Amino acid sequence: SEQATFFVAAGGGLVALLLSLRVVESRPANVTPIRPRDILTVLKDRNLLIVSLLAAIGQIMVFGTVYGFTPAFAQEKLGAAKWELGLLTAGSTVAMIAASYLISRFAHKLKLRRTIVLSMILVAFSCMLVPLCPSIGWLFVVQVFAGFGRSVTMALCMGQSILTVPDAYRSTAMGTFQAVYAAGIVLGPTIIGFIGQAAGRERGFLVVGLIGLAGSLLGFLLPAPRVSGIQAKEAGVK
């Protein structure tokens, strides 16, 4: 039954919780408390602000479509069955896993800034193509590209967010990054919902895609810091 899927998900979450109890946390001997002026110092980092905004825009697109209104579109407009909705999510997830494996090669050949911009454009076009899909098969293909682009964007932005920040401020920088992109998770479904209510859901997909295209231009503003080999590896670049 449909309810069984929720019980399976809850069971998976319980197993993950039990496994997390076995994780050993190593705490540094000397921890310096973060002061308010340290936070202000981190917030002045141009690189951190840009990648955080890029990640937020990426989340607006993904959570407004892939995890938001795309399943509703598939069910209402294309008559997708429940198992087909599951395949849509699975296709996007598998693409994300594949992108995580291939990301260092892409970033190395295309350079980091160019890779981030291209991945954002890929997700943006995926959003705009959703209402144009004539069948569930085509929608599945679009979902795969969206998942691939989203994984590349998030991984590179997350790694890039700490490259220009001193080691002592890295945890603060990562917290700032996560707080900003979390806003995109909330805004994505909200934007499509409001636009869909006023002018139709299909236009909502278009607007979110246009936001992604405009946001991708931020990638060209990223500085090109001189980083060590270890830092480059953390950002997904060999």
Image (cartoon, rainbow, N blue to C red):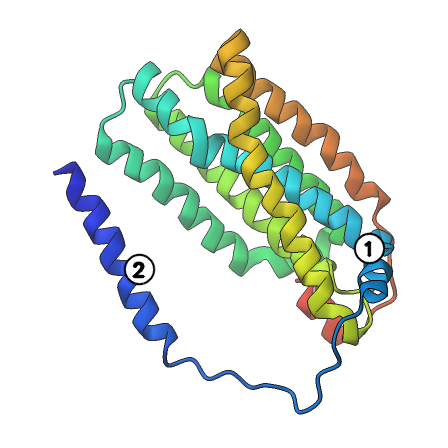
Q: Using the image, tell me which numbered label, if any, was put on residue 43.
A: 1
Residue lying at 63% horizontally and 46% vertically, measured from the top left: 181
Residue lying at 30% horizontally and 39% vertically, measured from the top left: 87
In the current view of this chain or complex, which residue is farthest to the bottom?
29
In the current view of this chain or complex, which residue is farthest to the left?
1
Residue lying at 50% horizontally and 36% vertically, measured from the top left: 63
Residue lying at 22% horizontally and 27% vertically, measured from the top left: 81
Tell me whether the residue at label 1 lies in contact with that at label 2, contact meaning CB atoms closer than 8 angstroms. no
Question: Is 21 positioned to the left or the right of 164 in the image?
Answer: left
- What kind of element bears circle 2? helix
- Image location (x, y in percent) of residue 29: 66, 91
Q: Amino acid at mark 1?
A: Leu
Question: Is 2 positioned to the left or the right of 86 in the image?
Answer: left
Question: Is 164 positioned to the left or the right of 23 in the image?
Answer: right
- Image location (x, y in percent) of residue 134: 39, 16
Q: Classify the position of the C terminus by image quarter.
A: bottom right
Q: Which residue is mark 2?
A: 13
Quarter of image, res 60: top right
Q: Amino acid at mark 2?
A: Gly
CA gap, disc 1 to disc 2? 35 Å
- What kind of element bears circle 1? helix
